[in-house]
């Protein structure tokens, strides 16, 4: 089992293709103390290290989108290959109510699937709202459907679900269940829009932010949320995504 | 029980407590410097700034291990010109909290140390900390200036000539005679010394068959560094009368007391932030006060150098 500090070595058990440039690496062991919203640092010796949110902890699963040199190398990985992981790190989501609306933008759906699983296991009610540019950019729709929760989809070009932003299904879900808490993961523009929307209807919201994470243990300052973002969210400035987050909790 | 006061004086400044955010930890922006002060640091030190912007090393740059932390971030900084407005903003925000601002600088040459100090001085930090001892850039910059009395003195002379602000020279632990080096920088007009920087070190991942850090070697900090730092501070205090910012592995109030007893005037806190975040300052401050009350020390000054008595 990996502790907070040093790397533990895992072997890739299988790889699930999520879309053209995103895949989930399912590893050969669990990370039992990991909670949805937390992240790990994944290292390929000689190539580099990058943060990934946890898309499942039993076994440990990491969803990787091919956006840079390290994630590109991770996307070439095959079953049987080794992967070094340190974590879990950071503060994850808190299930503060009995009903939850999960809002995923693009590959932001990954940690929410883990959250949905945990919430359903506790007997809570879950609705998933997944948004992306096109049908081809969506991930994990089937995995959410397999959990048996309602899955509402929006794409900007209308190629799947309703045409528009993920705020459309979110508004619909909030209409159905105004007492639910909202949990979102995706690009920062989407997160700020979800925050505004939830603020306007006075719903508590938890937002998982992406950042340039270097040390991962709250020391180097690289992952600080911009002061502008902190101001928009109504939180004190100096928020460290790796230590205080990645999940920002706002509202009642 | 004794009423212990944590407030203390340092080079004409008054600090709410002797705990200083050490350079390289969270000192990358005015908002993070302000946060460290808000959460209890008596003074804060910026991440070292050099003549040109630097991205630093790729990941992995830091990780925690059994004895603390190892890092090779690689002096990430925006360059001296860009740093000035950040320092000005930080100073303004820190003033409201009563926390002095220490600006850390580095450079690849003696002359550029003077130049960076001159540029940075425009922002009027309360102290310039001269980092001559970063262990993580030797492949680019060569042997650190901290390695010998002569080179340490030369940098001190250049910075002293460039600025009239108080300066503290940050020394390295891995030298034959740290007292002698402290003497050399004192003779060139340093107002204080900061001791110590991290210890050059390496972690190897056996399964990977490789060093863990991208830079291969890094600087060791945290609990493993404390006994090394205590010895260095003790040696310096025995040799020169300069005030010392004692830094290295302090993560509890008792550790801070030990550093003061060794001869430090102020106590740097860095890697301890890894354990409980910036909240470490308030915790360590409370623990130090509790220790002082129980042991009968009314002031921070009363502890200073007592271990040598």
Image (cartoon, coloured by chain):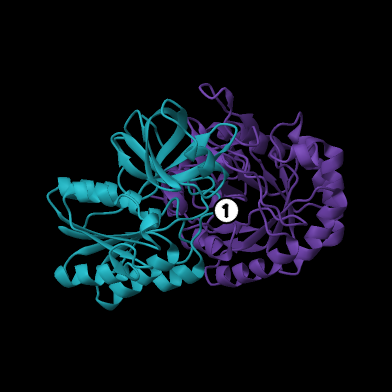
- The answer to whether residue A95 is left or right of residue B69 is left
Q: Chain of mark 1?
A: B
Q: Nearer the viewer, residue A3 or A103?
A: A103
The residue lying toward the viewer, choosing from B108 and A204, is A204
Q: Residue at x 70, y 53 (%)?
A: B54
Q: Position of residue B181 (x, y in %)?
A: 79, 38
Residue B103 visible in the displayed image? yes
Judged from this view, the residue extending furthest toward the left is A123
Residue toward you, B293 or B63: B63
Asked if residue A92 lies left or right of residue B186, the reply is left
Q: Nearer the viewer, residue B66 or A204?
A: A204
Quadrant containing the N terminus of chain A is top left
Q: Position of residue B78 (x, y in %)?
A: 68, 59
- Give the drawing colour for chain A: cyan
- Name above or below for residue B10 compared with residue B251: below
| Residue at the extreme front of the image, as rendered | A159
The reply to whether residue B308 is visible in this rendering is no
Identity of the residue furthest to the bottom in this view: A200
The local secondary structure at tag 1 comes to: strand
Quadrant showing the C terminus of chain A: bottom left
A248 on left or right of A174: right
Q: Which residue is mark 1?
A: B20
Q: How many marks?
A: 1
In the rendered image, residue B214, in percent from the top left (x then y), is placed at 62, 36
Tell whether A181 sits left or right of B38: left
The percent position of residue B207, horizontal first and vertical second, equals: 50, 22
Rate crowding at label 1 as few (under 14), some (14 to 19) or many (20 or more) other CA atoms within 10 Å.
many
Tint applied to chain B in the drawing: purple
Rendered position, B122 above or below B191: below
Q: Could you say which quadrant of the image residue B88 lies in?
A: bottom right
């Amino acid at each position: 089992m990996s502790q907070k500090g040093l790397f533990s070595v895992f072997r890739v058990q299988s790889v699930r293709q999520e879309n053209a440039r995103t895949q989930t690496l399912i590893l050969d062991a669990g990370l039992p103390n990991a909670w949805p919203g937390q992240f790990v640092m994944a290292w390929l010796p000689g190539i580099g290290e990058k943060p990934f949110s946890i898309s499942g902890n039993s076994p440990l699963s990491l969803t990787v989108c091919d956006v840079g040199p390290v994630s590109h190398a991770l996307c070439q990985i095959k079953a049987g290959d080794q992967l070094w992981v340190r974590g879990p790190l950071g503060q994850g989501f808190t299930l503060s109510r009995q009903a939850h609306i999960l809002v995923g933008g693009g590959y932001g759906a990954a940690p929410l699937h883990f959250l949905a699983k945990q919430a359903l296991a506790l007997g809570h009610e879950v609705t998933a709202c997944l948004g992306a540019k096109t049908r081809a950019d969506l991930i994990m729709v089937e995995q959410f459907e397999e959990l048996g929760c309602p899955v509402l989809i929006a794409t900007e070009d209308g190629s799947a679900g309703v045409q528009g932003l993920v705020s459309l299904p979110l508004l619909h879900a909030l209409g159905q269940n105004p007492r639910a808490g909202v949990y979102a993961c995706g690009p920062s523009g989407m997160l700020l829009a979800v925050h505004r929307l939830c603020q306007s209807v006075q719903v508590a919201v938890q937002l998982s932010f992406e950042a340039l994470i270097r040390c991962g243990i709250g020391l180097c300052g690289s992952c600080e949320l911009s002061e502008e973002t902190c101001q928009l969210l109504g939180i004190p400035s100096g928020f460290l995504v790796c230590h205080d987050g990645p999940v920002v909790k706002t509202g009642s | 029980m004794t009423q212990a006061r944590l407030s203390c004086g340092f080079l004409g400044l008054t600090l709410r407590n002797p705990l200083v955010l050490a350079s390289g930890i969270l000192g990358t922006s005015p908002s993070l410097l302000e946060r460290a002060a808000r959460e209890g640091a008596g003074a804060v030190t910026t991440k070292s700034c050099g003549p040109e912007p630097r991205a630093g090393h790729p990941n992995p740059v830091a990780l925690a291990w059994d004895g603390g932390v190892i890092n090779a971030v690689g002096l990430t900084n925006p360059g001296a010109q860009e740093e000035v407005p950040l320092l000005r903003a930080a100073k303004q925000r820190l003033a409201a909290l009563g926390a002095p601002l220490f600006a850390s600088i580095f450079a690849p040459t003696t002359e550029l140390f003077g130049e960076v100090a001159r540029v940075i001085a425009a922002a009027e930090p309360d102290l310039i900390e001269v980092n001559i001892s970063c262990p993580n850039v030797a492949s680019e910059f060569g042997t650190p200036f901290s390695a010998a009395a002569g080179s340490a003195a030369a940098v001190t002379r250049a910075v002293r000539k460039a600025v009239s602000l108080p300066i503290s020279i940050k020394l390295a632990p891995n030298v034959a005679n740290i007292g002698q080096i402290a003497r050399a920088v004192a003779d060139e007009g340093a107002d204080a010394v900061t001791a110590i920087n991290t210890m050059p070190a390496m972690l190897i991942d056996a399964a990977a068959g490789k060093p863990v850090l991208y830079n291969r070697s890094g600087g060791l900090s945290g609990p493993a560094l404390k006994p090394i730092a205590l010895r260095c501070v003790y040696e310096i205090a025995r040799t020169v009368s300069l005030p010392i910012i004692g830094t290295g592995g302090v993560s509890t109030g008792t550790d801070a007391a030990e550093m003061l007893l060794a001869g430090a005037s102020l106590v740097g806190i860095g890697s301890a932030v890894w354990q409980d975040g910036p909240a470490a300052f308030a915790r360590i401050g409370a623990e130090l006060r509790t220790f002082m009350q129980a042991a009968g020390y009314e002031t921070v000054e009363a502890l200073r150098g007592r271990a040598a008595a």
